[in-house]
Image (cartoon, rainbow, N blue to C red):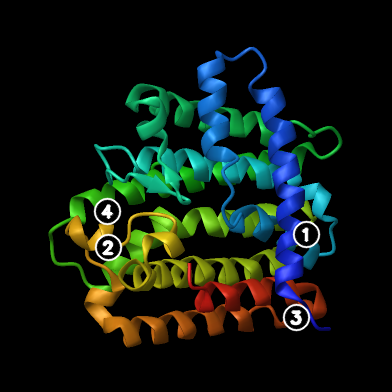
Amino acid sequence: MTLELPAYLEARRRIVEDALASRMDVVCAGAPPTLGEAMRYSLLSGGKRLRPILALAACEAVGGQPEEALDAACAIEMIHTYSLIHDDLPAMDDDDFRRGRKTSHKVFGEAVAILAGDALLTEAFRVAATARAGREARVAEVVFEVARAAGAAGMVGGQVIDIEATGRNVTVGGLEALHHAKTGELLLVSVRAGAWMGGAGPEDLQRLTVYGRALGLAFQIVDDVLDVTADLATLGKDPGSDRAAGKTTFVDLLGEGGAKARAREVMDAGIAALAPFGDRARPLEALARYTVERDR
């Protein structure tokens, strides 16, 4: 089966955008107008929507319908957006642009940006649990896994490791562990959550876990390459910000060519884990190749 990835991504992106907008209507009902505006500003500002699309694709790979994973997919994108709002703050990465627009704190001020992130994180779990009737066990597992992936041993913990590693010597293995927590966990849980909502069994879930881990690492390696090769118009955020902040990147340790080769090596192993799914995993395979070959 041949998959036209641009058409697939656009179709799934529209599904996700519509779902996010409708869920924000519910989430923002009764919220102070400024808070609702700030939440919408960051969440509905576009982007690749890679994480929710991964959840839908993983659901399909195990034989489910993409709609079954839509609440989980939206919840994960809300958590991802909250993390970007907080990462951009002066106390963290101090970035002025995100997705080609001014960052939240540049538009609404630091206090409202922090609270918008807090609200997106909190409301994400309400969204994840909204349509739980008749599938309580699946939803409970997804909520548990998403909380773990986003929490102290996952994304937030990875951010702390990143802060503490700034300006210090870091090995390749240490950098991979850092980014597995900071970036990879949320990508991995996108895949696992979609598979859970599609009714995956233990063997399929393990195969998709191998794939998700590989995708998370490859994604970050390519991000490091783009940070030194892309410009603001292409990247949508300040280029070179990691290097300027004294953070070690895969390009620093492996060189540009070595980093690209490592990304391909990691992703090839992840794609190999998809073989038993056959044509149902074509979107996941195409997304993996896109992750390595993307230019933004």
Along the line of sight, the residue nearer the viewer: 100 or 89: 100
Pointer 4 local density, CA inside 10 Å: few below 14, some 14–19, many at least 20: some
Q: Which residue lies at the image location 40% right of the left edge and 31% below the top edge? A: 107
Q: Secondary structure at mark 3?
A: helix
Q: Nearer the viewer, residue 21 or 52?
A: 21
Q: Secondary structure at mark 1?
A: helix
State the mark number for residue 11.
Answer: 1
In x, y percent, where is residue 135?
82, 40
Earlier along the polypeptide chain: callout 3 or callout 4?
4
User: Mark 2, mark 3: which one is toward the viewer?
Assistant: 2
> Is label 2 in contact with label 4 (beta carbons under 8 Å)?
no
Q: Is residue 153 visible?
A: no
Q: Earlier in the sequence, mark 2 or mark 3?
A: 2
- Residue at the spot of label 3: 276
Tell me where residue 99 appears, x and y as whole percent: 48, 51
Kindly indicate the quadrant of the structure image that contains residue 24: top right
Q: Secondary structure at mark 4?
A: helix
Left or right: residue 88 compared with residue 137: left
* 153 vs 211: above or below: above
Q: Residue at the location (64% across, 12% down)? A: 30
Residue holding disc 2: 240
Q: CA distance from mark 1 to mark 3?
A: 25 Å
Q: Where on the picture, by quarter, is residue 5?
A: bottom right
Residue underneath mark 4: 162
